[in-house]
């Protein structure tokens, strides 16, 4: 998968001391919303400052809708799927991909994350965002 790095510190704004916020970034990028708005949405869902938060729990809280997008889970047909084995599922459209203890956005096959994840990373879930 191609990788598009982004400036983590430059997008946090007032949340400069934040960490463990990969879910915030993934949602912000995939749903085209400002970091602060995504951060507030996750706070409403129960995320604590400087703590990670399960993407699946947030999507359930939001009843499968984020901003102007409907969210659906993409079926993974492999027993132990890796990024390399499922990259064909994310070639067009907007996605949030969760791997072990991390989440990132994929837009039209390009990973948007602060650091590249290897092709052998185990995929836990893929969520497709479709405009409403």
Image (cartoon, rainbow, N blue to C red):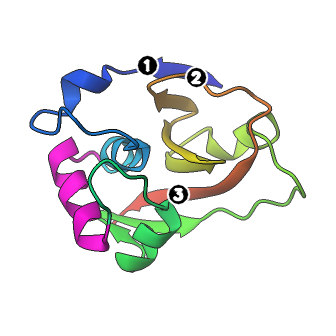
The kind of secondary structure the magenta stretch mainly shows is helix
Q: Are marks 2 and 1 in contact (CB under 8 Å)?
A: yes
- In the shown orientation, is residue 59 left or right of residue 48? right
Between marks 3 and 1 in the image, the one whose residue lies nearer the viewer: 1
| Residue found at x 27% / y 45% | 32
Q: Which residue is mark 1?
A: 5
Q: CA distance from mark 2 to mark 3?
A: 20 Å
Q: Residues within 10 Å of mark 1 (few under 14, many from 20)?
A: few
Q: Which residue is mark 3?
A: 128
Q: Residues in magenta?
A: 32-46
**Residue 109 place in picture, x, y as percent:** 58, 33
Q: Let me know if residue 44 appears in the view.
A: yes
Please tell me which of labels 2 and 3 falls first in the chain: 2
Q: Which residue is mark 2?
A: 116
Q: Are marks 2 and 3 in contact (CB under 8 Å)?
A: no
Please tell me which of labels 2 and 1 falls first in the chain: 1
**Residue 74 place in picture, x, y as percent:** 65, 62
Q: Is residue 57 above or below residue 110?
A: below
Disc 2 is placed on an element classified as: loop
**Residue 25 place in picture, x, y as percent:** 35, 41
Disc 3 is placed on an element classified as: strand
Please tell me which of labels 3 and 1 falls first in the chain: 1
Q: CA distance from mark 2 to mark 1?
A: 8 Å
Q: Residues within 10 Å of mark 3 (few under 14, many from 20)?
A: many
Position of the N terminus, as image quadrant, is top right
Q: Which mark is residue 19?
A: none
Assess whether residue 28 is covered by the magenta stretch.
Answer: no
Disc 1 is placed on an element classified as: strand
Residue at the limit of the structure toward the right, as seen here: 79
């Amino acid at each position: 998968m191609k990788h598009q790095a982004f400036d983590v510190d430059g997008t946090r704004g007032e949340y400069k001391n934040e960490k463990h916020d990969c879910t915030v970034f993934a949602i912000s990028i995939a749903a085209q919303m400002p970091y602060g708005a995504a951060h507030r949405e996750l706070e409403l869902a129960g995320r604590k400052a400087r703590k990670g938060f399960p993407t699946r729990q947030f999507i359930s809280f939001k009843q499968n809708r984020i901003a102007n997008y409907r969210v659906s889970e993409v079926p993974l047909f492999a027993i132990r799927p890796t990024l390399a084995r499922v990259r064909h599922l994310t070639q067009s459209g907007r996605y949030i991909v969760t791997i072990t203890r991390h989440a990132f956005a994929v837009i039209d096959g390009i990973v948007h994350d602060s650091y590249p994840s290897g092709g052998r990373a185990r995929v836990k879930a893929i969520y497709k965002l479709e405009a409403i």
